[in-house]
């Protein structure tokens, strides 16, 4: 093989993303879109069949059930409906959460199945899934009419946003999308976004705790309500409806603990007082107190304080003192924005009657949430700093070394041990005076992959090799073999080498004695 080889034609080198672009075709994107929409439709049909099958005297044919699943699919995307002219915008969140988890799981499985780990591939899948759901929602809303109706622009927007958000959550679980977003946002913004998600988890946990305590305290009234049901199927239907609205109750519990409270028609419930009003006969809403505020209700204020302090302790990790307040402010802003959106979606009209409207006061709840998160978090981020050693240990535990990196470390350690053994062997060959057989020189493979140089360096190397072959070898007895002798000055060494013939022994060697190192 020649030393100098021509470089490959750049036009013939395949692009890195060409294989991915070939594999993520329209057929596979259509498959993931069809799967996500079909799963949502089957989920809505299953819930309707379960509710209709347990109701007393309900005899629903299969075509009617499949047709009724279309508005159910829109309701799972939080699209407000008009039923016989009555608006229904207070929709259950549990089907929305289940649908989002299914879309996220399908997206992650699709990316993993076809090994699409790039951020560009993930964004393409998210865009296609969101746009397809938006278009399908608008088409279904346009086809509705008569008994159930829906707004076409609202269906387009809500179906697209929910599907895209769920698909993005699934893409962040697999691939490089989350890492790319972190690099793009920077450490401060990333810490603030993580703090906002943590604040969301804390406020939902606080709301769930309030809802569970209220349900436990109102257990006798819930039992009386279920006992007055006409049949077991009706009681099961009420329990199923309460279960579907359980995430709504968690958001309402946070609004109660934060201060704005809950409004159901004339009834207003806050931890510092209530306004009387009728209570809907639903097991989940029976937990609303019809009377005055209890003495222990003010203790729920400790929940927002604890949530804000916990966010402050966790949000400052990995940041210096100058960037911690900015991350805390961003976390509080993210939490307040989420409360604004969800509280607005939770409230609305419940079909008219004496229980309209249902309101969680979204604007006031967002402002209060911002304060509850920010005020306790700012002192906590300074009072409980993270030690550098503990932070480094946590980072090492959370980010395990890659398998390839571990193999490279092991190979480097093995090479170091081999170099140490070779140096021990050289020391063993040399004599006590440091002189000995230097051994055979290892032949260097100029065509090996290690010599990754350009063409100019190869040409210079070949020229040097040709000059070395043309010149006669000159044997020098100075250097390492005569380490115990003083080297001659430069001008004397040049005169000395000029007097000697090529191949003759050095004049420093005594007559009749063999030069040292003749075992070479």
Image: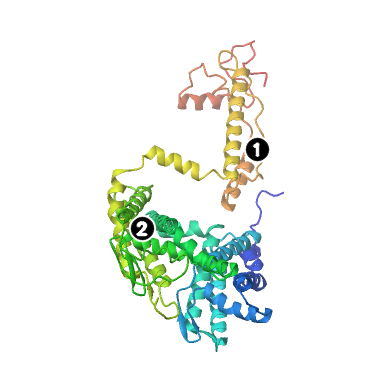
The residue that disc 2 covers is 331
Residue 444: mark = 1
Looking at the image, which is closer to me, 503 or 61? 61
Q: Residue at x 65, y 51 (%)?
A: 4
The one of 54 and 300 positioned closer to us in this rendering: 54
- Residue 319: x and y in percent read 35, 48
- Secondary structure of residue under mark 1: loop
Left or right relative to 245: residue 371? left
Residue at (62%, 27%) from the top-left corner? 502
Whether residue 281 is visible to the viewer of this picture, yes or no, is yes
- Residue extending furthest toward the right: 1
- The quarter holding residue 333 reads bottom left
Report x, y in % for residue 85: 48, 87
Badge 2 marks a residue whose secondary structure is: helix
Instruction: Quarter of the image for the C terminus: give it.
Output: top right
CA–CA distance between discs 1 and 2? 60 Å
Q: Earlier in the sequence, mark 1 or mark 2?
A: 2
């Amino acid at each position: 093989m020649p030393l100098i080889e021509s470089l490959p034609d750049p036009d013939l080198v395949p692009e890195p993303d060409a294989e991915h672009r070939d594999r993520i075709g329209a057929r596979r994107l259509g498959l993931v879109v069809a799967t996500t929409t079909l799963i949502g439709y089957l989920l809505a049909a299953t819930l309707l069949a379960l509710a209709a099958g347990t109701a007393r005297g309900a005899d629903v044919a299969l075509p009617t059930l499949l047709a009724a699943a279309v508005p159910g699919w829109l309701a799972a995307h939080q699209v407000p409906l008009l039923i016989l002219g009555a608006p229904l915008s207070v929709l259950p969140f549990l089907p929305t959460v289940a649908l989002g988890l299914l879309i996220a799981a399908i997206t992650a499985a699709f990316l993993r199945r076809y090994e699409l780990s790039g951020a560009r591939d993930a964004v393409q899948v998210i865009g296609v899934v969101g746009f397809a759901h938006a278009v399908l929602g608008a088409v279904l809303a346009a086809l509705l009419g008569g008994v159930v109706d829906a707004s076409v622009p609202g269906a387009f927007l809500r179906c697209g946003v929910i599907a895209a958000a769920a698909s993005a959550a699934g893409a962040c679980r697999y691939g490089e999308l989350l890492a790319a977003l972190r690099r793009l946002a920077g450490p401060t913004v990333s810490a603030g976004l993580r703090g906002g998600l943590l604040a969301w988890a804390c406020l939902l946990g606080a709301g769930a705790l309030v809802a569970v305590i209220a349900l436990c305290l109102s257990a006798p009234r819930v039992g009386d309500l279920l006992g007055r049901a006409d049949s077991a199927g009706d009681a099961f239907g009420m329990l199923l409806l309460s279960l579907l609205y359980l995430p709504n109750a968690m958001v309402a519990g946070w609004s109660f603990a934060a201060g704005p409270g809950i409004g159901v028609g004339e009834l207003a419930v806050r931890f510092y007082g209530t306004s009387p009003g009728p209570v809907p006969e639903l097991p989940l809403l029976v937990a609303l107190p019809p009377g005055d505020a209890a003495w222990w209700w003010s203790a729920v204020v400790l929940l927002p304080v604890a949530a804000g302090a916990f966010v402050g302790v966790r949000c400052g990790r990995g940041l210096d003192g100058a960037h911690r307040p900015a991350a805390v402010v961003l976390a509080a802003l993210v939490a307040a924005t989420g409360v604004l959106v969800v509280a607005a979606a939770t409230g609305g009209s419940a079909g008219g009657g004496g229980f309209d409207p249902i309101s969680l006061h979204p604007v006031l709840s967002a402002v209060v949430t911002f304060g509850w998160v920010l005020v306790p978090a700012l002192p906590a981020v300074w009072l409980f700093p993270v030690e550098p050693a503990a932070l480094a240990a946590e980072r090492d535990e959370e980010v395990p070394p890659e398998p390839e990196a571990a193999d490279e470390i092991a190979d480097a350690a093995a090479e170091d041990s081999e170099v140490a053994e070779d140096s021990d062997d050289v020391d063993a060959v040399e004599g006590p005076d440091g002189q000995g057989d230097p051994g055979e020189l290892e032949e260097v493979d100029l065509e090996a992959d290690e010599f990754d140089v350009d063409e100019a360096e190869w040409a210079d190397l070949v020229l040097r090799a040709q000059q070395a072959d043309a010149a006669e070898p000159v044997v020098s007895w100075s250097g390492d073999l005569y380490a115990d002798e003083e080297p001659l000055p430069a001008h004397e060494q040049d005169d000395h080498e000029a007097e000697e013939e090529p191949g003759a022994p050095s004049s420093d060697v005594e007559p009749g004695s063999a030069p040292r190192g003749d075992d070479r």
